[in-house]
Image (cartoon, coloured by chain):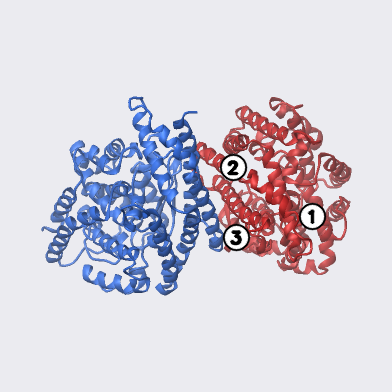
Chain colours: A red, B blue
Amino acid sequence: MSPLDNLRAHDRVTSALAQVAGRLGWDQETVMPRGAAIQRGDEMAAMEAVLHARRCDPRLGEWLNEAAQTPADSPTARADHALIRQIRRSHDRACRVPGELAAELARVTSLAQGIWAQARADEDFASFAPTLAHVIDLRRQEAAALCEGRDLTPYNALLDDYEPGASEASLTAMFDALRPGLVALRQDIADAASDAPALPEHHFDPQVQMALATEVATAFGYDLTRGRLDCAVHPFSSGSGADVRITTRTDPADPFNCLYSTIHEVGHACYEQSITPDYALTSLGQGVSMGVHESQSRIYENQLGRSRAFTGWLYGRMRDAFGDFGVGDEDAFYRIVNRVAPGHIRTEADEVHYNLHVMLRFDLERRLIAGTLDVTDLPEAWNSRFADDFGLTVDRASNGVLQDVHWSVGLFGYFPTYTLGNVYAGCLHEALRRAVPDLDDRLSRGDTSAATGWLGQSVQQYGALHEPRALITQATGQEPGVTPLLSYLRRKFGDIYGV
Amino acid sequence: MSPLDNLRAHDRVTSALAQVAGRLGWDQETVMPRGAAIQRGDEMAAMEAVLHARRCDPRLGEWLNEAAQTPADSPTARADHALIRQIRRSHDRACRVPGELAAELARVTSLAQGIWAQARADEDFASFAPTLAHVIDLRRQEAAALCEGRDLTPYNALLDDYEPGASEASLTAMFDALRPGLVALRQDIADAASDAPALPEHHFDPQVQMALATEVATAFGYDLTRGRLDCAVHPFSSGSGADVRITTRTDPADPFNCLYSTIHEVGHACYEQSITPDYALTSLGQGVSMGVHESQSRIYENQLGRSRAFTGWLYGRMRDAFGDFGVGDEDAFYRIVNRVAPGHIRTEADEVHYNLHVMLRFDLERRLIAGTLDVTDLPEAWNSRFADDFGLTVDRASNGVLQDVHWSVGLFGYFPTYTLGNVYAGCLHEALRRAVPDLDDRLSRGDTSAATGWLGQSVQQYGALHEPRALITQATGQEPGVTPLLSYLRRKFGDIYGV
């Protein structure tokens, strides 16, 4: 076998095992008996140990060096070189992190998730604090190992896992460019609107919500023969290729939580399902970064799902499903779905406030990783910053520092990719509107196929073939920046609120 | 670390990975999207390759030889030597089988399961035949590898996976000893009974069946905080330690299918859940053989679950759950639950016919593995033997050769352990009656705790500490044999049918 063939064969098994480990995560969040948490931690650690050992395999280093000589003019050269790039990145990273630390991180974060969920249910940050401190300590050790002998900050080392090519500096610049426009728009809306439109008071049967969520997921192109939709504490998407599963949750008082979480996760899932089958079970067979992933979920959810055109169709479907639920017409429905108001919860935030939630987390988590903010001081830091940014008091931990699962599972450096995704979604939406002039006509009939088809062709099919920024540049014809997102928000909410 | 510590550490990771692989099987049978079958085959193969490589690890051979010197008088000597025995068995086996063959078997059997299920639904053996031939070919290759240089037949080599210490010869002797008594009893019942009591004509709501199944499972001691009960095409039990899951199925016309499948699987699950926690995630932390496993599932299902005492309690619970379902009293109910009649389906067979179903499979699968029966001739061989043994024509493949999943997933040598389990259950039941004189009083109140407690103490807690026959001998105070089972059947059905 050639070095490249060796790499391919090795990568295929590693990719299959990574799918298994990912599915174990799905299982933990959806169907695992609660008494299995400790055993599950050991199982996760064992899988991580196997994956880590494969990624460190010294033969990979040899094959990578030899395969790099692959001629650039072979028919598969582009994919070959991208595969080599992806495997090299994973190999280099794994070689720097001791296997015991990788396994311990898997074990501890698996357990931490349950401890966080219980603490959130109990509104008891103190019971979670030691676990969080442990997770942060392990991630800091990992970051230190990744930085050794390199000109790299610990936070950037972690960020690289989720968004290759991004840095604290580039993200700070992005947030600095976004923030004034968002704050100004929020202020204009607050000045103009006496009250945000309220949710109708109605009982929305959870089973009917799930049936409608399934219909909407299908309308966005989610293939349920290669996926499934379940209820879980957290909406999430999991898996690649032929087994891409999503979850959502229901609140009898608020059907939009379920429906828009579903559309969001469908965006993630369709990305994974739309990657060319040639890349299945390879290092190219997955979304290239969390920022690009989030661009898909956010454009499905917001630019498409919360558009005037699509909400018109959705209003009809909700009337069919729930009868008269107390909203008089499509326009009122559109305003409710797009109501702008400060709130505690990131996942329920409107498009204007959402990135402000992310900025708060970005700033706090950098201090946690830098060691300049102690876990015991975190709730106070959160609440104080939240009051500054949102003008709201945090009344309980589940409305504040305990609301997100991310830190419990060690996801430091992940939050900023949400905003990066929004920025990319803004760019893609602009290009999509040019490419599909009659988009609103189609969306108003519940037909997303032109939009999702364009995203599939322009972004999703490539998997990890192109680097993130290069992919967005190729898809949109220009370097990504914050202007399209800010223009879109100003236009959309300017229309709604007359500002 | 001492050689024994090295073995323990290695075994712990392998055991955790085996749990992951097992859970992947659970996932496939319960929640996997149908379009994921091919990818799943690759994932299963990757897991098997990892497990196989760990079990062949040459360091194991060294550690095993060194650890065998462990002094026999240390406090943990008994468990240490049993652990060494189990790891050596697994190591020796794995070293004989090429890794590629092990992985290919995992891949092909994963896929074959879906192909079998489709063929069964379509009543189309021909569409399954090439796959079955492929599975048999791979298993024969494996058996040949296991036999190389040893005085061992291929069938015995496969049998050893499920029942260490058993052989074609010992099982044939067991069947020969059982068969005349079973055939005579069946004939006596047929002569005495004009008609077997029929199932009542009633619609048994599947959701109510599942709720009652959950209650019955709990009544038998199944711990749902470390397990779960789902619907699947096949009832099965899966997992060890803190995550032991079972499935059942519902038929609106026949609630006993659901209820007794549940009790059966609860027997398996309670065995796994009752193993001493010291053995969790080790090679001792699992049932010692399929025969012993089946002894637990069958004694829960039959000697306890179908007893006059317990069915009296169950009748009351069914009246509570379903109202008047057309059975007048406890005695009529007992006769229905224990009706004896020849039928096509093994899993629905009464206690008199059950082992005749197993004998048919035992004889046919030995010929398949020996190469003296071709897959294309299998349906004819099945149907002809079935007519001889049961006096019934096989009207369709799902009532004949396609009814069981086992051969599709490569389980050759597994079927006879069902009857061995029945024989062991007979022995254990006799000892249990001696140990718990007021058992019927308790069962008539739905209280299984004395029985399951005795089984837990006498059998289940030990996991794989003792070899199968030694375990049953220790629990019952005598060498196992067929007499207790035959006496029990003759007494029970003699009472019911007056023969």
Residue A251 screen position, x and y as percent: 61, 48
Res A48 label: 2
Q: Is residue B117 found left or right of A401 in the rendered image?
A: left
Q: Amino acid at mark 3?
A: Ala
Q: Secondary structure at mark 1?
A: helix
Res A242 label: 3
Q: Secondary structure at mark 3?
A: loop
Q: Amino acid at mark 2?
A: Glu
Image depth: mark 1 or mark 3 in front? 3
Work out how far the residue at label 3 is from the one at label 2, CA to CA, in angstroms. Answer: 22 Å
Residue A446 screen position, x and y as percent: 70, 66
Mark 1 lies on residue: A425
Tell me whether marks 3 and 2 sit on the same chain: yes
Quarter-of-image position of residue A472: bottom right
Q: Is residue A371 above or below residue B30?
A: above
Q: Is residue B238 found left or right of A129 in the rendered image?
A: left
Specify the farthest residue to the front.
B149
Q: Is residue B305 visible?
A: no
First in residue order: circle 1 vs circle 3: 3
Work out how far the residue at label 1 is from the one at label 3, CA to CA, in angstroms. Answer: 25 Å
Quarter-of-image position of residue A410: top right
Q: Amino acid at mark 1?
A: Ala
Q: Is residue A79 above or below residue B488?
A: below
Work out how far the residue at label 1 is from the one at label 2, CA to CA, in angstroms. Answer: 33 Å
Residue A306 screen position, x and y as percent: 75, 57
Q: Chain for mark 2?
A: A
Q: Is residue A366 above or below residue B103?
A: above
Q: Residues within 10 Å of mark 3 (few under 14, many from 20)?
A: many
Q: Is residue A347 found left or right of A234 in the rendered image?
A: right
First in residue order: circle 1 vs circle 2: 2
